[in-house]
């Protein structure tokens, strides 16, 4: 029986890098079918939090619970349920788009790799460039390919760090629609972004990180940009 | 075990595909190793007579230097694209990633050695072909010992700012026993009458080092790679 979970709980997590405290007692709970926006200025700790949630980084204190499991109690089985699209896209420029996806699909032990990869390439709008080297792709094309890489194995928890970078309006909107589809499939999606216009209406809840501290933003009729501005101002006071 | 080997194979195949496309590491390591051998040949061969036992030492120095270069470049490639993080995220035993990287570097160094051995033999009048099986055993066990430690250190240092300096500083002191065993074993083979019992002794010692180094690397890879 494969491991799965429907709830993510970040419990009082802190992370230090030397003397610098990147995350300060962060707590957060998400359930399946939720899209959480993670906002905050540069250096606020968003990428550090995503790295901890992806198990790439261990917290200095506190713990993350994926259902009943933690990263220390569940290794490969937990990683099979996580997908990460980092600021760096984790693609090999010397390989073609198809080879990149086939490599990661094989690494994740996916079945019917060719069919799966073909569908993913079509979803990324790269069906006609499938056998071109990624080195020749624009940032937007790489971004779309990297998103498909992160989704190939059907992760329960999807972590996206600046997913709108390099995307034109149409691709950005397509990504928003894709994420809304994932919500309906019961995925937990955390999106760290600065692109508040594209993300407007996407998030179920919004969390703001500032200087490593997290605060939840109450839902209101105000625009995402205004809510974010208010939250950052409140954190300054 | 099957899953472990499958992941190692996938990683190795990917590394070799990338290398076949770019040929960056192969060309630079071969160029560097050949340059190294040529410089030593000019310094140590007088009127067609090389220094005694020089061939064995020069061969292993060239392999060690070329190996260090290959190790650094292999992981630099993963660092530039941050793909090592993607490998660490895969739902497989992380030591399988280590084994895949190790096998890729071993194959690459094997190609370098195929070029180096005849070149050193030619320039230093060394008859490497007299005992081909022992030669292959010495090269395989010695290269495995060197690269097993090197792969671990290169992966560990991938985020260190001064990784290019730190890799040889950490690697050479630990692998000196491997290089000495390789040199002495090779020197035993290159005598006018090859000393097989002595070569066997050094190969046995190299196998011992390989078992110790590979076991330690498999054991420590995951904790060292988790930040």
Image: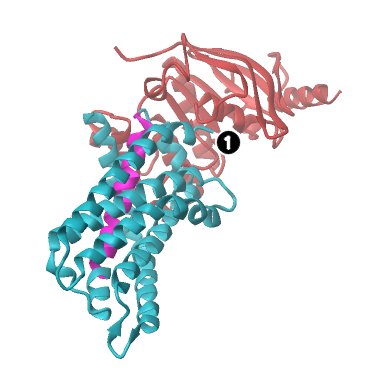
Chain colours: A red, B cyan
Question: Is residue B111 rendered magenta in the image?
Answer: yes
Q: Is residue B39 above or below residue B138?
A: below
Farthest-out residue, right: A237
Q: Which residues are magenta?
A: B92-115
Q: Residue at x 30, y 58 (%)?
A: B182
Q: Position of residue B146 (x, y in %)?
A: 36, 52
Estimate the x, y position of residue A140 in percent, counting from the top left. 49, 45
In this view, the residue in front, B2 or A224, is B2
Viewer-side residue, B58 vs B49: B49
Quarter holding residue B51: bottom left
Image position of A111 with respect to A35: above or below: below
Residue at the spot x=26%, y=75% of the render?
Answer: B119
Question: Where does residue B218 sit, x and y in percent of width and height?
Answer: 36, 35
Asked if residue B97 is among those painted magenta in the image, a careful observer would answer yes
- A90 or B226, which lies in front? B226
Quadrant hosting residue B216: top left
Residue B91's place in the image compared with B62, above or below, is above
Query: Is the stretch drawn in magenta largely helix, strand or loop?
Result: helix
Q: Which chain is disc 1 placed on?
A: A
**Label 1 secondary element:** loop
At 39% across and 36% down in the image, what residue appears? A149
Given residues B45 and A184, the one toward you in this image is B45
Q: Position of residue A157 (x, y in %)?
A: 47, 21
Question: Does residue B117 appear left or right of residue B41 in this picture?
Answer: left
For label 1, the residue is: A162
**Label 1 CA crowd tier, 10 Å (few <14, some 14–19, many 20+):** many
Q: How many marks?
A: 1
Residue B89 can be seen in this image: yes
**What residue lies at 24% left-to-right and 37% top-to-bottom?**
A114
Say if A77 sits above or below B62 in the image.
above
């Amino acid at each position: 029986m494969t491991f799965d979970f429907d709830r993510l709980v970040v419990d009082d997590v802190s992370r230090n890098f030397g003397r610098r405290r990147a995350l300060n007692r962060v707590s957060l709970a998400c359930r399946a079918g939720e899209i959480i926006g993670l906002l905050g200025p540069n250096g606020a700790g968003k990428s550090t939090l995503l790295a901890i949630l992806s198990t790439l980084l261990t917290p200095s204190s506190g713990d993350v619970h994926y259902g009943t499991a933690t990263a220390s109690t569940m290794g490969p089985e937990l990683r099979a349920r996580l997908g990460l699209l980092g600021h760096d896209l984790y693609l090999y420029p010397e390989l073609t788009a198809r080879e990149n996806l086939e490599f990661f699909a094989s690494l994740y032990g996916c079945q019917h790799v060719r069919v799966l990869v073909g569908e993913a390439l079509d979803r990324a709008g790269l069906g006609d460039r499938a056998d071109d080297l990624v080195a020749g792709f624009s940032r937007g094309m790489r971004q779309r390919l990297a998103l498909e890489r992160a989704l190939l194995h059907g992760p329960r928890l999807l972590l996206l760090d600046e997913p709108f970078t390099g995307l034109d309006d149409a691709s950005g909107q397509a990504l928003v629609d894709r994420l809304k589809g994932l919500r309906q499939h019961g995925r937990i999606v955390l999106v760290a972004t600065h692109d508040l216009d594209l993300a407007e209406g996407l998030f179920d809840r919004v969390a703001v990180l500032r200087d490593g501290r997290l605060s939840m933003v109450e839902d209101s009729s105000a625009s995402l940009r205004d809510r974010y501005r208010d939250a950052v101002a409140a954190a300054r006071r | 075990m099957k899953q472990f080997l499958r992941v190692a194979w996938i990683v190795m195949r990917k590394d070799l595909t990338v290398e076949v496309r770019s040929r960056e590491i192969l060309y630079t390591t071969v160029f560097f190793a050949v340059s190294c051998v040529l410089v030593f040949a000019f310094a140590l061969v007088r009127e067609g007579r090389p220094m005694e036992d020089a061939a064995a030492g020069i061969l292993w120095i060239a392999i060690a230097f070329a190996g260090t270069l290959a190790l650094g470049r292999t992981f630099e490639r993963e660092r530039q694209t941050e793909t090592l993080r993607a490998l660490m995220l895969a739902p497989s035993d992380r030591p399988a990633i280590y084994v895949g990287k190790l096998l890729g570097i071993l194959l690459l160094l094997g190609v370098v050695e195929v070029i180096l051995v005849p070149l050193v033999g030619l320039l230093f009048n060394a008859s490497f072909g007299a005992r081909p099986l022992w030669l292959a055993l010495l090269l395989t066990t010695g290269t495995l010992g060197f690269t097993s430690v090197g792969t671990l250190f290169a992966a560990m240092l991938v985020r260190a700012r001064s990784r290019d300096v730190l890799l040889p500083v950490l690697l050479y002191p630990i692998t000196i026993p491997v290089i000495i065993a390789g040199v002495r074993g090779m020197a035993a083979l290159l005598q006018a009458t090859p000393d097989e019992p002595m070569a066997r002794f050094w190969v046995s010692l190299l196998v011992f080092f390989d078992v110790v180094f590979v076991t330690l690397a498999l054991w420590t890879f995951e904790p060292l790679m988790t930040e």
